Amino acid sequence: MAAMKLLALAVFAGSVCLAQTPDAVLDDWHRAAAAADEPRYFGHFAPQGIFMGTDGKERWTIPAFRAWAKPYFDRKKAWNFTPHDRHVFYSKDGAVAWFDEMLDTPNLGPCRGSGVLIRLNGEWKITQYNLSIPIPNALADSVVKQIKAGTQP
């Protein structure tokens, strides 16, 4: 019986450690958005976190971003981004991680997310996330001209 308790404790401890990797936090954060789980989604942010959206004017504090996103979560349909090709790097002391990831999105097409996580009280928290739409170089001139003209494609 003691061996079973020890095994259960080891499995639990291993899953807690696994859940505390930046990869696991980011994956759960994306799943929380897809499930429209507002408390879980915003619980992954550091208090001083920033979310930068695809529009150049979108630089949100977390309270402002949460207020903007609330109607989406309330109607139980937020967004569903599927991450892949993620790269994570760590500071020497292991207290900061930065990353980039590609995202498949149903409404924006291919996107890129990048950002920074910090360790707060033993947990990884997103302190900055930047969502962007990678523009192929062949289209860049046209998009730049449209932005300068103040028009949307």
Image: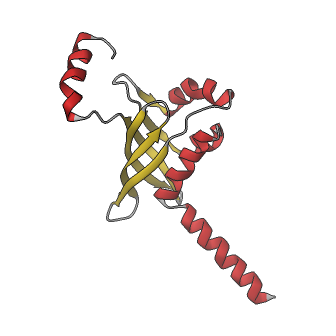
In the rendering, at what x and y percent does residue 81 appear?
50, 41
Is 150 drawn above or below residue 46 in the view shown?
above
Check the picture and name the quadrant holding the N terminus.
bottom right
Is 109 drawn above or below residue 85 in the view shown?
above
Indicate how the structure is coloured in the image. Answer: secondary structure
The residue depicted at 65 percent of the width and 40 percent of the height is 37
In the rendering, at what x and y percent does residue 45 appear?
52, 43
Side of 94 relative to 41 (left or right): left
Near-viewer residue (129 or 103)? 103
Check the picture and name the quadrant holding the C terminus.
top left
The residue depicted at 24 percent of the width and 10 percent of the height is 149
Near-viewer residue (99 or 102)? 102
Corner quadrant of residue 52: top left
In the rendering, at what x and y percent does residue 117 appear?
43, 51
Side of 34 relative to 60 (left or right): right
Near-viewer residue (133 or 21)? 133
Side of 28 relative to 1 (left or right): left
In the rendering, at what x and y percent does residue 113 appear?
39, 42
Side of 6 relative to 93 (left or right): right
